[in-house]
Structures are given as C-alpha cells and as structure tokens.
Amino acid sequence: MSDAFSFQLRKVSKRFVKGKETITIFEGLDLDIPAGDFVAIMGPSGSGKTTLLNLLGGIDHVTSGEIVFDGQRVDSLSEGQLSAWRAANVGFIFQFYNLMPVLTAAQNVELPLLLTTLGRKERRRNVATALELVGLADRAGHYPREMSGGQQQRVAIARAIVSDPQVLLCDEPTGDLDRATADEVLALLQLLNREHGKTVVVVTHDPEVTRYTKRTLHLNKGVFVERTALA
Amino acid sequence: MNQALLVAKNLGRRKLRTSLMLVAIFIAFFLYGFLECFNRAFHAGDNASAAERLITVNRINFTMPLPVNYAERIRQVQGVKAVTYQSWFGGYFQDTREPLFMMAVQPDTYLDVYPNLQMPPEQRRAWLATRTGLAIGRTVADKYHWKVGDHLPIASNIYSRKDGAKAWEFEVSAVFAAPDDPQRDSLVLMHHDYFDEGVTFGRDQINMAIMTTASPTLNDQIEKAIDSLFANSEAETTTDTAAAFNRAFAAQFGNIALIITLVVATAFAAILMIVGNTMVMAVRERTREIGVLKTLGFSGSTILAQILSESLLLALLGALLGLGAAAGAVSVASRFLSGFGSNLHVSTAVFLGGIGWAVLLGLVTGAIPAWTGMRLRIAAALGRH
Ligand SMILES: Nc1ncnc2c1ncn2[C@@H]1O[C@H](COP(=O)(O)OP(=O)(O)OP(=O)(O)O)[C@@H](O)[C@H]1O
Ligand SMILES: [Mg+2]
C-alpha cells in the first residue's frame, strides 16, 4: 500500500438497523483519497454524505469493509484508539461551527492542544499561529457570541488545524454563510490545501465549492455516480 | 487554559442555576456543621478517662439527692480507689439567664478523682485551705475576666441562704485547665462544706458520688457491688461509667444524635435530588458540545473526569461555604452557652467529616451525567443538519 493515500476505502458497507428495518447507506463502496487531495463530495440530502465523513473520521463504524488511513487500518481500532488517532490526524469543520460558547476564540483553538504534551508557552504560540493563519489574530479574546458566522467558522478552522493534522473533514462548512463569507472560507481551505499540504474533504450542497476543489464526487443513493476532474 | 479552567467555565455558564445549587448545598452543610458541633459537644465526655470513672446517682433519677455518707460507704467497696462527691449548685453571676456550670465538691478527694485538673501548686494549696475559695476553669476565667484573688458574689437559683442573704461570697483561689477534658474547663468548683453550712435545705446531701477504680475490668463487678449495697435503702442507686452517664444525660434533651441524623439526612436527600437532577439537565444541554470534544479527540474517560470534577467542585464549594458559616454561627452560639465551654466549635473532625460528605455528594450527583457523557456516541450527539 502506498503512503501517497490519505484514505483508501475498500468494499465499505454501512447499514443502520432500526427495529426490524435495515437502511443500507453504502454497499461495497470503494474510494481513494490521495494525500494532498482537495475533494468535494456533493449529493442530495440523505445520500449519505455526512455518514461518509463520519466513517472517514472514525466517529461512526463501518458495517463491513476496510478503511485504510496512511497505510494503516483504522476501521478496527477501539474507541480509545480512535480518539487518539483523531486527535493526531483529523481536523473537523462543521456547518454550525460548534465552538464552546464559554471559551474565547483562543481558548477554543487551544482545546485540541490540551490532549498533547505541549507546554503552556508552545500551546499559546501554536494558537497564535493558527489564529494568524485564519486572519483572526485580533479576535483571540473574543467569545463566539461576539463574532460573525464567518469569523466563528474561521475560529473553527483554526481549531481544526492547530494540532497540524494531515486531513480536514468539512461538513457543509459554508452552509450557514453568505456568498462572500463562504468564498473567504473556501479560499482559506484552498490555501491550507495548497500551501500546507492538507488533504481536505468537503461535503456540500454548494456548487460554487467546486471552483476551489481539485475534484468533485457526486454521491447518489450511496453510490458515486460520476467523477469530474476539475482544475 | 487547562482542563480545570474548562470545568470551572462550564460550572459558571448558568450563574443563577449554579447559585441555586450552591445555596441548597450550603444549607445542608450549614445544618450538618452546626448540629454536628452540638452533637459532639454533648459527647465530649466520652473519652478514655471517662471510662475509668464510675458515677453513682439516685436510682429514681440523677436530680434526686443521695445521703453524703454514701461516699464513705462506697469507699469500702473492694476495687474502689478514690471517691469524691458533688452537688449541682445552680449558681449564676448577676444574671439568672447566664448560669454557671457550678458544683459543690469536696476539694481534696475531687482532685484525687480528677488528677487531670492542672493548677499551680500554691493555688491548689490556697483552694484546699480556703472555705469560701473557688477553683474555676480557664474558659470561665477568660469569659468573665476573673482572676485569683477576686471576690465574687454568686447566687443560686436552687438554694437560698439561712442568713437570708441573696448571694454567697466567694474568693477565686485557683484557675485550672484540663487539656484532655475540655468540658471540665468551664466548671466552677466550691467547697461542699461551705455549701452545707449555708443552705436552708439539702444539708448532708449530694447529687452524685464519683470514683476511680483499680482497673476498668473490675467496673462491672464494682457497679453491682455498690448498687446492691444500697438496695432496699431509703435511696437506691444506679452506678455506671461516666461515659454512659454523659450519654444518658444528653438523652435528657431528647435523642440529639437521632434528631441531628434525621435533619441532616433529610437535607442531604433533598439536595441529592435537586443537584443530581440539575446536573443531569446541565449536561444534557451540553450534549452537542460533548460530541464536539470527543470529535476533537477527548476520550470518554476524560469527559467522565471533567463532569465528575464539575460536580465535585460544586459540592466542595457549597460545603466550604456551609461549614464556614456553621463555624461562625457556632462561635456566636458558644458565647451564650458557656456550659459547653470550649467544646463547642467546628473541630477538625467535623470539618473533615463535612468534606468527606461533600466528596460523596459530588460523586453521586455527577455519576449519572458523567456516565452518560462518557458513553455518548458522537454521531448521535452531533445530530444531523
Ligand atoms: N443513526 C442513524 N440511524 C438511522 N438512519 C440514519 C442514521 N444516520 C443517518 N441515517 C440515514 O442515513 C441516510 C444518510 O444520512 P446522511 O446524514 O449521511 O445524509 P446527508 O447526505 O448528509 O444528508 P444532508 O445533505 O441532508 O445532510 C439518511 O437516510 C438518514 O436518514
Ligand atoms: Mg449531512
């Protein structure tokens, strides 16, 4: 297996069992996401986009099949191992930012670093760097309620990158933003992909996203229906 | 920032709700601290030295007198080492509402039975030699600013004088301390002879005889021997250890320990439900945030520890405030209840007991939400947009 892949999915099936009913979301799904990819996953509501991101991020489990990350099986890791793996390798960005309302921007960004062995000083330096990168150095002491949606999302991005993970998983990152702000956020993700080599997976309804990504996958009823390579 | 700050911030997120929980916990620990101090003061006599002493009182009840010659007869019983006797004088200084813890005793035998009363040798000699002399405990001396050589008129609310005078004249001969037996520090001791010579009634009568024995193992046997000595006489007796007597004495005020236990248990049961329920709601509100923390890589056990820390912090904060207020209230109360002397305070044992209960409370109220938080599945917590 090559290290040039972030994720390799092999024959992944995902079913939800609810009472007597079984809902099959994926059946034998294959997917390769090379390291350094910037991929948009589009599809109608209910097609399984969020479910796919959850599987990639190890916050939900496959029913069968394999997920290989950086040459290592992650689908068979225990809950505790997955926590540690996520902390080291994956940053999440959500539609509704999901910042802690009781913490300032800087404290929110610092959260993932509490799980590392970094000292106070180093943590503070990394937080400053991350906030600088998203253009919010001057907002470090502000609480989420004191910031606009776009600013909150940028804080969330800073939080996702502060521990320098290889992969960013974004679920509708621009879903709650106006066009101009959405473009800023997408440009930021593009910068992280191009300049910092992050693998970025974006799940979205927003067709504009494809202007920023390297390629787009269309998901329909659990199957990739068409693959378009865009510049 | 660190995890402790995160815990504190979560607790401070709803100021009103947290304050109400604090008040509930505060009340329970205030009650515990305050009542437990009284409970312990009542039982302050239950120490090892008290177990070595026996007390003989009238079988009907301890306020009924015994003839003074009983003391001599008890002295003859095999195994009895020293015997003394005392009568409750019911003394007060100027204000009837501030009674003194005052006994008429036979000084030389009293000091044989209570060798733990410490006083300078010359004061001891002076007290033994002075018929109107008083030996007073340090707590009393401090409270009234009395010192050796002071002349004091003290009246009794039980006994009137033969000569018609209201007050008895006394002179302070000695000030003593009893470090191992703080209740004794608030005693005022007068000569029984002086008492006998002045009273219009109750002459040659005593409230109790107190003795030390050759060995505690003989106590049962000696108790029986004494009580059978006076069986079928005009005043039958009950003999028991001083510790048992103290407990029986305390029981006169109702079963204090039981009342305290019930009151405190009720208060604790109430806050257990209030705080437990509120913690469950507080954590449920944060379901999504817990999901996010887990997404960031916080493990289930870290979440468990955070929520338990939060409930512990709350319980300890409330407990410290409650115990602090109890200490204040008890110190005010002790000024009006000199009979308890220096026993009435929030001791280390009461304090540590309170902290122990607070830890238990914190763990119990945090258990369900912490467990729920630990087990929370991320996908479910984040919901779907
Ligand atoms: N825990 C669950 N139990 C049962 N069914 C589920 C569960 N989670 C998701 N599903 C189902 O799986 C399907 C895919 O859901 P998913 O959230 O992945 O869709 P999506 O593509 O992200 O949709 P949207 O664009 O609306 O966010 C849906 O039909 C949904 O009802
Ligand atoms: Mg979705």
Image (spheres, helix red, strand yellow):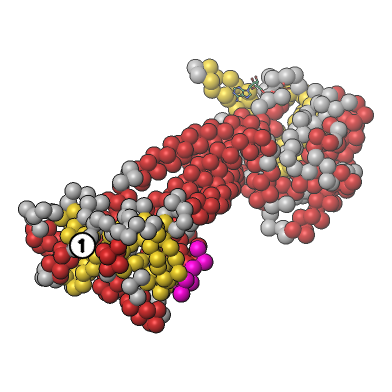
Q: Position of residue B84 (x, y in %)?
A: 23, 68
In the image, farthest residue toward the front: B163
Q: Is residue A139 left or right of residue B275?
A: right
Q: In this view, does B230 lie to the left or right of B125?
A: left
- The quarter holding residue A79 reads top right
Q: Does residue B219 belong to the magenta stretch?
A: no
Q: In which quarter of the image is the C terminus of chain A?
A: top right
Q: Which one is in front, B80 or B26?
A: B80
Q: Main secondary structure of the magenta part?
A: loop
In the image, farthest residue toward the left: B232
Instruction: Give the extent of the magenta segment.
Output: B144-150
Q: Does residue B147 belong to the magenta stretch?
A: yes
CB at disc 1 and ligand 1 closer than 8 Å: no
In the image, farthest residue toward the top: A21
Q: Position of residue A129 (x, y in %)?
A: 85, 51
Q: Which residue is drawn at 40% across and 79% down?
A: B123
Q: Where is residue B183 in the image (x, y as percent from the top left)?
A: 39, 61
Q: Residue at x 63, y 25 (%)?
A: A26
Q: Position of residue B318 (x, y in %)?
A: 57, 45
- The quarter holding residue B56 reads bottom left
Task: Identify residue type, mark 1.
Answer: Asp
Q: Which one is in front, B111 or B24?
A: B111
Q: Residue at x 43, y 36 (%)?
A: B266
Sort mark 1 into few (<14), some (14-19) or many (20+) by Cα contacts within 10 Å: some
Q: Is residue B120 left or right of residue B11?
A: left
* Residue B53 seen in render: no
Give above or below for B14 relative to A225.
below
Give above or below for B172 relative to B377.
below
Identify the element where label 1 is drawn: loop
Give above or below for B186 relative to A10.
below
* Residue B112 seen in render: yes
Residue highlighted by disc 1: B204
